[in-house]
Image (tube, rainbow, N blue to C red):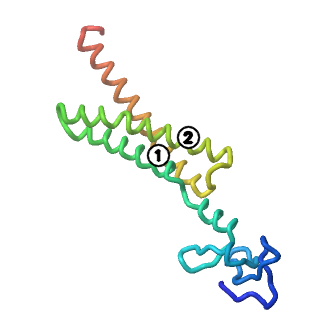
Amino acid sequence: MSSVPTPGATCARHPSVSAVDVCGRCGSFICPDCVEYVDGTTPVCGPCARLHEAERPSRRGWAGVTLSFLGMAGMLLGFVLTGRPGLWAWALALPLGFAGLGTSLSELSRLDRRTASSSALRVARVGRALGFLHALLASAVLGLFALFLWSWKGGG
């Protein structure tokens, strides 16, 4: 949507400087100092460039999803593998899944304080859901393991 500003147009932020382009997002006139390019081609003003950058899900949100997914995958792998490899898979999956849950909850807290983008909300919610699912599965496995140990030692 780039267009050439009308002759005599001045920058919206610097009224004493002639405009060289029009913001592709908000339509304000921008000078050479203010112009930034989104996706390499669309000229935007500084505030619109920051808004565009903030619309992406954060790395923290994606880290929460990834860690939660790895925790779930490790738990499921622990069911498939037998013997020590299965126990190692569970042992590695537990901290990964709980770290994913914590990271996702931290990102949701940041979103509540309006310091992260709203589009990251979906990513953080997926991470939280996977993290809670992992926690539920991990609790069931640990509970069954504790019950097994209790009955094995002659507790019941």
Task: Find numbered disc 2 in the image and state the secondary structure of the residue it sits on.
Answer: helix
Residue 16 higher or lower than 145, as above or below: below
* Residue 110 spot, x, y in % from top left: 62, 44
Up the image or down, 133 lies above or below 16; here it is above
Marks 2 and 1, the one that precedes in the sequence: 1
| Residue 53 coordinates in the image, percent (x, y) | 59, 63
Crowd rating for badge 2 (residues with CA inside 10 Å; few <14, some 14–19, many 20+):
some
Q: How far apart are marks 2 and 1 (CA)?
A: 9 Å
Judging depth in this view, the residue of 124 and 35 nearest the camera is 35
Q: Which of 59 and 79 is in front in this view?
A: 59
- Give the residue pinned by disc 2: 106
The residue lying toward the viewer, choosing from 97 and 80, is: 97
Residue pictured at 67% horizontal, 78% vertical: 32
Looking at the rendered structure, the number of numbered marks drawn on it comes to 2
Q: State left or right for residue 139 relative to residue 125.
A: left
Task: Measuring from the top left, give residue 23's x and y in whole percent.
Answer: 70, 77
Name the image quarter holding residue 134: top left
Does residue 66 appear to the left or right of 14 in the view shown? left
Please give the label number shown on residue 64.
1
Residues marked 2 and 1 touching at CB (< 8 Å): yes
Q: What residue type is labelled 2?
A: Ser
Which amino acid type is shown beneath numbered disc 1? Gly
- The image quadrant of residue 54 is bottom right
